[in-house]
Image (cartoon, helix red, strand yellow):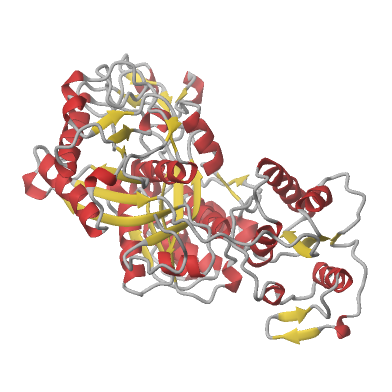
């Protein structure tokens, strides 16, 4: 484990510094983690009237009315990105979800796209079938501006370039097609670009919306879809999985740079590998143990990771005995002959099979497990499949949520993703480095905390959410909070600012019933003489070090002045910390014709 930030980090290590997730039963990664540690199943069992498919399917005795429902699949907040309603309706649901998720990932990492001058790589996987089912645009004779605009909004290829464009960023844009291994492939390509120096930071992820939505599936014996809608990884009575939708993105940066930039680090990507079964597959679409084993081993070798130091294996885990047996056999070959050294888990029991984001659900589970030092239970596992022969493998099924105390002295996780068509992918994650101790925060120093939004309602939501967040996490330092808010959020028209000397003062200022005190807001802030401020290339600079000068700066900013926030934090050792992201106000957008 790393002892200090001065250590020379492995040049192949990549830090995960931001994350965003929407999954069945969870609109945020925090809700997702809470569902995991409490063993909740988020697959819904639908009423007949809620299913939008052919009537003959619903009445089939083999139709299973189960689905991992994404409740925001048809909603979007275009105003944040300056997108018209007409364009919002033309964009496919996956284009919209990926854009909002990429925004949240940057904010979670503490970065404002308007203040980034770096090259940002954008890598994402989606499902081309979704675009085809979302009212395909006509085959136009003209290729004029309107036709081109509609095509770029709808096309699955432009999901990542749209994200760069609407967030005002530049860098690589790569939309990945690797079926259910898409998330892992996106992360693998992003890491390669970062390590080659082609990009400075990268957003990688995927979006999946199954259409029509919601819908169930037809059960067929020995196929991957469950007979009763429940996914039972590693269970003797498993019959497969349910289908689900979601979106996952992560923000990546080379580890040494992340430490130097004082980023919050959830986990470290030690290694990644991809391959394909090709002609050697036992059957097209099934895992081929030797090829999958080679992929898992390659990811560990790339990261210089010994198999006996990996104490969590997050499996693809479809919950079908045949596929589970193939995967456990492949992973056992990659790990070697040691026994009972790694927990094995499967998130599909909680959320079903999310297609191109299924690996993302597993990766976020593993990253949060590393951050929280806890192993969530694999649910729906009541009778372990004896054919898996776990006692002779390196793995022990994680049947109860437990603290993560590895014998190797360091926490590492391997996450496998398998895609139909022979796609194999594996990631190795490690817990974040232990950073040097910081001196306690100086008491009584006045600090500026800022929030902004497009309108007053969203601004009120931000205040309420931040207040709840600070109450729930008493370990957050005020200097880190202010640093993250002032430099890590896009500045919008409606603004709120407070000059405070403690967390308690900030929590009080954020309260709806706060009597004013240190806080000022758009429309209520006093006017100040801006001629008294010095100016830099980035805006006005406070005129002194006392609380009064900071209050004047806050009032000027709330009234529309551009402020050089970097000067407020120059010379500090403040760190970026995760805080609530922008409260999107989604509306329904759905195109039925062109």
Q: Nearer the viewer, residue 51 or 126?
A: 126
Please give the name of the residue rendered at 41% of the width and 37% of the height, measured from the top-left corner: 404
Q: Is 582 left, or right, of 434 in this rendering?
A: right
Instruction: Report if residue 254 is visible in the image.
Output: no
Please give the name of the residue rendered at 59% of the width and 53% of the height, measured from the top-left corner: 578
Q: Is 295 left, or right, of 272 in this rendering?
A: left
Q: Quadrant of residue 392?
A: top left
Q: Nearer the viewer, residue 111 or 585?
A: 111
Please give the name of the residue rendered at 43% of the width and 72% of the height, measured from the top-left corner: 200
Q: List x then y, in percent, for residue 174.
A: 35, 64
Q: List x then y, in percent, for residue 320.
A: 24, 26
Considering every residue shown, the one lying at the far left of the view is: 280
Residue 467 sits above or below residue 519 on the image: above
Count numbered badges in the picture.
0
Residue 590 sits above or below residue 218 on the image: below
Q: List x then y, in percent, for residue 561.
A: 79, 75
Q: Please identify the quadrant where the N terminus is shown.
A: bottom left
Q: List x then y, in percent, for residue 2.
A: 41, 58
Instruction: Report if residue 37 is visible in the image.
Output: yes
Residue 128 sits above or below residue 227 on the image: below
Q: Quadrant of residue 342?
A: top left
Please give the name of the residue rendered at 40% of the width and 43% of the height, measured from the top-left corner: 366
Q: Nearer the viewer, residue 57 or 8?
A: 8
């Amino acid at each position: 484990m790393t002892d200090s930030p001065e250590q020379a980090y492995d040049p192949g290590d990549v830090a995960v510094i931001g994350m965003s997730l929407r999954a069945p039963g969870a609109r945020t990664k925090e809700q997702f983690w809470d569902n995991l540690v409490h063993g909740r199943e988020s697959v819904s069992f639908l009423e007949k009237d809620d299913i939008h498919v052919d009537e003959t399917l619903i009445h089939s005795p083999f139709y299973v009315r189960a689905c991992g429902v994404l409740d925001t699949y048809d909603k979007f907040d275009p105003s944040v990105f300056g997108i018209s309603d007409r364009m919002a309706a033309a964009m496919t649901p996956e284009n919209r979800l990926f854009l909002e998720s990429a925004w949240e990932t940057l904010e979670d990492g503490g970065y404002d796209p308007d203040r980034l001058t770096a090259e940002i790589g954008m890598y994402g996987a989606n499902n081309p079938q979704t675009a085809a089912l979302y009212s395909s645009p006509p085959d136009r004779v003209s290729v004029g501006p309107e036709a081109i605009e509609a095509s770029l909004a709808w096309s699955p290829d432009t999901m990542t370039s749209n994200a760069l464009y609407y967030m005002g960023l530049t860098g690589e844009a790569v939309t990945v097609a690797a079926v259910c291994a898409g998330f892992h492939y996106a992360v693998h390509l992003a890491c390669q670009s970062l390590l080659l120096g082609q990009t400075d930071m990268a957003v990688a992820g995927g979006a999946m919306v199954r259409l029509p939505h919601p819908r169930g599936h037809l059960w067929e014996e020995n196929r991957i879809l469950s007979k009763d809608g429940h996914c039972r990884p590693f269970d003797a009575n498993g019959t497969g999985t349910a289908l689900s939708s979601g979106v996952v993105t992560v923000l990546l940066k080379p580890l040494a740079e992340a430490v130097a930039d004082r980023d919050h680090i959830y986990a470290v990507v030690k290694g990644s590998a991809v391959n394909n079964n090709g002609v050697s597959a036992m059957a097209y679409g099934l895992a081929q143990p030797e090829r999958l084993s080679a992929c898992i081993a390659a990811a560990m070798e790339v990261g210089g990771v010994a198999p006996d130091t990996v104490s969590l294996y997050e499996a693809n885990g479809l919950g079908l005995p045949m596929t589970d047996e193939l995967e456990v056999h492949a992973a056992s070959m990659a790990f070697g002959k040691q026994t009972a050294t790694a927990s094995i888990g499967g998130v599909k029991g909680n959320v079903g099979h999310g297609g191109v984001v299924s690996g993302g659900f597993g990766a976020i589970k593993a990253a949060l497990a590393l951050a929280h030092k806890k192993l969530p239970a694999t649910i729906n596992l009541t009778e372990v499949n004896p054919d898996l022969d776990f006692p002779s493998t390196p793995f022990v099924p994680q049947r109860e949520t437990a603290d993560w105390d590895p014998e190797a002295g360091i926490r590492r996780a391997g996450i496998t993703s398998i895609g139909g068509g022979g796609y194999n992918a594996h990631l190795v994650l490690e817990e974040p480095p232990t950073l040097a101790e910081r001196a306690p925060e100086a008491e009584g120093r006045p600090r500026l905390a800022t929030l902004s939004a497009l309108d007053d309602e969203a601004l009120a939501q931000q205040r309420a959410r931040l207040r709840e967040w600070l109450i729930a996490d008493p370990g957050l330092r005020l200097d880190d909070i202010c640093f993250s808010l002032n430099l890590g959020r896009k500045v919008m028209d409606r603004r709120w600012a407070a000059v405070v000397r403690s967390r308690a003062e900030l929590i009080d200022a954020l309260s709806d019933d706060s009597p004013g005190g240190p806080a000022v807001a758009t429309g209520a802030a006093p006017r100040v003489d801006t001629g008294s401020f010095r100016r830099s290339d980035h805006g006005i600079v406070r005129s002194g070090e006392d609380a009064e000068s900071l209050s004047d700066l806050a009032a000027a900013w709330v009234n529309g002045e551009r402020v050089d926030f970097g000067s407020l934090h120059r010379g500090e050792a403040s760190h970026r910390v995760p805080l609530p992201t922008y409260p999107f106000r989604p509306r329904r957008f759905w195109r039925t014709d062109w």
